[in-house]
Amino acid sequence: LRKNNPPELASDVTDLLLVEHKDKTTEIEMKSYDPLDTTLKFVTRKDDLDPIYDDSLRAEMSCSHAVTPESLTQWCRNLLDQGHYTFKCPALVEGTTRCNKAWSYQEVRRLADLSVEEMQHFEDNMARMAAARHCEFQPCPQCKTNMERKDLSNLCVICIICTADQGGTYQFCWQCQKPWKGSAPRSDRCGNDDCINRDLQLLQTCKSIDLPEVAGVTSCPSIRLCPTCGMKIEHSRQNCKNVICPRCHKEFCFVCLKLTRQCCKTSSPFRICPGGVAPRQTSIPVWQRK
């Protein structure tokens, strides 16, 4: 996964939305506000998100910036597609400073005039991303009930459903999805012969790559785990050495595995880090969700 600036860091909101319009406006009917709707506060100034719709009726958001239902829908859909399930205003307030005031989904839904299909799309994706950020689910191999681990460093999980049904403790391995064998707790594997962490195995066997645009990087593992949340990430071998994790949205150096703000203290994005290429990872970072 190559680094792409998230919407709130885009250099030009207008250009970003123009791309979206080229792709999508031909597929959906243009939206407009009802001028007789007394629940909205209409304004005469230009659209703060997208000046394309200069002749459209515009409403004022809670942050006081003006939008059309179409520009608001496109902006928030773009945020959603980038992996963000919260919505913030991108309007410029002073030079290059963005408003960044958060909008509630209820406000977005109302002023974007979302259709039933759009609401379904937004709510399904928001729920999925929120759950992925705050929880880690996996089905019990026996009863198929979704379970969540309280201790992310322990692979031994007790299914309370199967335990209640069977009248005895039922434990399974989070990693190999088989009934637990051996002592517990353990963070590496259970006692089953084929209990292997395939992510760690992949890290040890993936090919090495060079980064043509980063001076000095000629042998780097092609797959890394995000140092914040542990998600697998690949580098496209284009542009600089920094990547943004699509799950936790932290930016880090693919070469030394430090967060970008730390790496940039001693090196530039297009040069190898002073400590060289970090070795292949042998453990999975545990995401300390807040």
Image: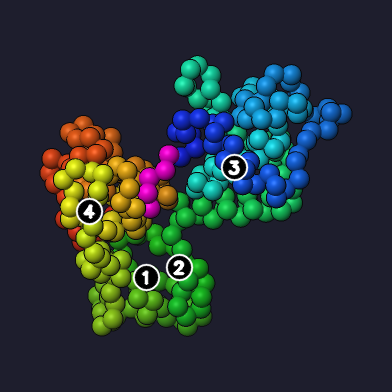
Asked if residue 269 lies in the magenta stretch, the reply is no
Q: Please tell me the numbered disc located at residue 138.
A: 2
Left or right relative to 205: residue 276: left
Element carrying mark 1: loop
Q: Which dot, 1 or 4, sits closer to the camera?
A: 4
Q: Point out the stretch of residues depicted in magenta.
A: 1-5
Report which residue position mark 3 lands on: 20
Q: Which residue lies most toward the left here?
A: 275
Q: Please tell me the numbered disc located at residue 210.
A: 4
Identify which residue, 176 or 267, lies in the foreground.
Answer: 267
What residue lies at 54% left-to-right and 55% top-to-bottom?
Answer: 128
What whole-number distance in Å separates the C-alpha atoms at marks 4 and 3? 33 Å
- Marks 1 and 4, the one that precedes in the sequence: 1
Q: Amino acid at mark 3?
A: Glu
Label 1, residues with CA under 10 Å away: few <14, some 14-19, many ≥20: many
Above or below — where is 26 with respect to 158?
above
Above or below — where is 155 with respect to 248?
below
What whole-number distance in Å separates the C-alpha atoms at marks 2 and 1? 8 Å
Report which residue position mark 1 lands on: 174
Residue 15 picture quarter? top right
